[in-house]
Image (cartoon, helix red, strand yellow):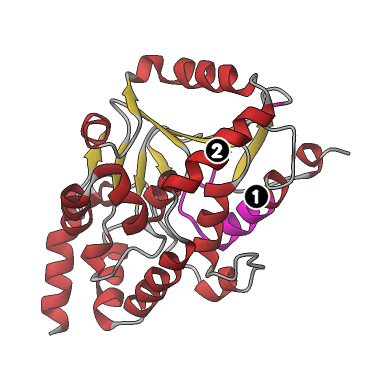
Amino acid sequence: MAFIDEFQPKQFTLTAESETFWRVTFTNPPVNVIGPDMIRELKELLTELETDPGVNVVVFDSANPDFYLAHYDLLANPAEAESLPSPTGFAAWPDVLVRLSKVPAVTVSAIRGIARGAGSEFVLATDIRFASRQKAILGQMEVGFAALAGGGAQARLSPLVGRARSFEILLSGSDFDGDLAERYGYVNRAIDDSEFEEFVAAWATRVSRWDPRVIREIKTAVNADTLPADAKFPPQSDAFWFAASTPSFQAVTKALVEHGLQQDTDIEHHLGEQIAPIAQKANAELA
């Protein structure tokens, strides 16, 4: 039996639009946080994609129009994810992202809704990023936790948006809508939401029909000139997990959870705006 028939993930659905075009749709309510179960299933999917010669394009989208991938699951036990196999030898999340960036198939993030933190890191690791003009929100809010982003956002953002804009994104912790993300190079392009699904499907279908040999040759050539060195990722992951152990990080997380973090609440919809005053208050109380 084919992998796509045997594989039964719970955190996303896997659909074969054709023999050469697969679709992965995130389905982890309420806001699609990235936890150990999703990481485990993504690792299984990547193991297949790394060796499957027939898949040319994989589109990653979300069943929730408001949340693409909200962020890492801050309430999960990190040891669960770290106990999973890691072919790269890296920590759990960098292992997923480094492997995702190198699979032979073309990977496309179809971003409707919020992709912050690890969600933003996921889309940065894919080959193509298309964003809904009205629905997409991207951002790296780790600065609010007094932490460096752990999944390599620093290494991937700078070649895309430049040094100054990387500082703007990483130091502000703010949200960037589809139009601004397109202008900065954070995404390839922003498309009106009414045309978004049709556009992504048409683009992916067109590319999926090319000769797989030439797709892989193009990816190999472009990757050689553009992918960050793997050695950049472990120090960033280590810095994040060190920060996660500090009283400041824990106090900010506790305060955000009390405001409804990881639920479909106002704080998740407007985290880029609200994290600063909440973090500042939590740190003041800690002092």
Q: Earlier in the sequence, mark 1 or mark 2?
A: 1
User: Considering depth in this image, is 59 or 103 the residue closer to the camera?
Assistant: 103
Bin the neighbour count of mark 1 within 10 Å (Cα to Cα): few under 14, some 14-19, many 20 and up: some
Is 68 located above or below residue 255 in the figure? above
Left or right of 16 on screen, residue 63: left
* Residue 31 at least partly seen: no
Specify the segment rendered in magenta: 20-44
Contact (Cβ within 8 Å) of mark 1 with mark 2: no
Q: Which residue is drawn at 74% across and 37% down?
A: 53
Q: Nearer the viewer, mark 1 or mark 2?
A: 2
Is 136 located above or below residue 48 in the figure? above
Left or right of 220 on screen, residue 136: left
Left or right of 222 on screen, residue 16: right
Which of the numbered marks, if any, corresponds to residue 219? 2
Which of the numbered marks, if any, corresponds to residue 46? 1
From the top left corner, tell me how far across and down residue 280 is, in percent. 12, 69
The three-letter code of the residue at mark 1 reads Leu
Which of the numbered marks, if any, corresponds to residue 168? none
Q: Is residue 166 magenta?
A: no
